[in-house]
Image (spheres, rainbow, N blue to C red):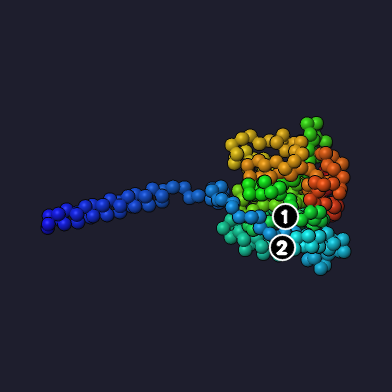
Amino acid sequence: MYNHRSSILRSYIIAAGTLLCLGALLLHYSARQTPLTPSDVLDTRRFDDEFPRKIWQTWEQYPQDMDDELQRLSKTWTDMNREYRYELLTSESATTYVREHFKEQPQIIQAFEKIDHPILRADLIRYLTLLAEGGVYTDIDTDCSRPIREWVPQGLLNVSNVVLGIEIDSRGEEPRPDLKVPAGLCQWTIMSKPQHPVIQHVVDQVVTQLNDFEEDNENSAVLTYDVVMKTTGPRVFTAAILNALTKRTGQNITYKDLSEIDRPKLIGDVLILPVSAFASGQDHSGSKPWGNEEQLVSHHWRGHQGWNAHVEDQ
């Protein structure tokens, strides 16, 4: 009996020692691995939750200080989406927001605080609010044509984690000289779940472009329309989305995949809406007149008109 118990005891000791050795080896191996980057962590995240019920807008003043027309437009978002929280960020509060929400990504804070041009700041902050908290970002000169809860078809609701709309589509023809690209996505209205890797990729690309712009121009040069488009605006936004989708799907996603979309199209977990959803009333790209059955948002282009004080045509 004594020998039998001794044998069992020895077995337990050997087993415990083996587990301790394996644990030590595992810790040693793990310590030597390259730490996960934020994008790596984001890529492994599951997006089982609903889209956050949050509406973001930005402007120079708070709603009570805006003119009557902008107040009317802004009010359509809260009136039509009563279950949504609403927040408007000014230039000052946007800086506070970035400092509070991106402590773990100091390169973003640094890039944002270096921007002197209000247009570049306005572009970047829309991506940052969606990355941090998700929801719907929409420009102050838009109005809500249909409630947000109706934007995504029921059959696509559980598989869509970002919702974008077409702005430009040459539909197989040569791009118009003023549009320059064969297809493009709106960034005046975007819906996303928080911490999505596609939006993170957009932020990464825009921060890179801003750093390059600052290095080349010391951030004091007069902006041109073309510089805005490729630094923070729709052109770099679209290119970054296509690049991110290519990486996530393992397929070569190009401008052709954005062309001639006549019904909602899912690429990976990004839902692309037809041009009339966010961009009705344009004189190009197959856009239908205002008031059509596909229209979700009306864009009034008042913000674009205000660019004249900050941006040169060429």
Circles 2 and 1, Cβ within 8 Å, touching? The answer is yes
Q: Amino acid at mark 2?
A: Glu
Residue of label 1: 149
Give the percent coordinates (x, y) of residue 106: 59, 57
Give the percent coordinates (x, y) of residue 223: 78, 49
Residue 174 in which image quadrant: top right
* Residue situated furthest front in the rendering: 155
Who's the residue at 79% across and 35% down the image? 170
Relative to 278, 135 lies left or right: left
Whether residue 196 is visible to the viewer of this picture, yes or no, is yes
Is 93 rendered above or below residue 108?
below
Residue of label 2: 83
Relative to 39, 241 lies left or right: right
How far is the residue under mark 2 from the one under mark 1? 10 Å
Residue situated in front as seen by the camera: 270 or 306: 270
Relative to 251, 83 lies left or right: right
* Label 2 or label 1, whichever comes before in sequence order: 2
Residue 178 in which image quadrant: top right
Whether residue 232 is visible to the viewer of this picture, yes or no, is no
Who's the residue at 61% across and 35% down the image? 251
Decide: few, some or many residues near mark 1? Use Cα within 10 Å; few <14, some 14-19, many ≥20: some
Q: How many marks?
A: 2
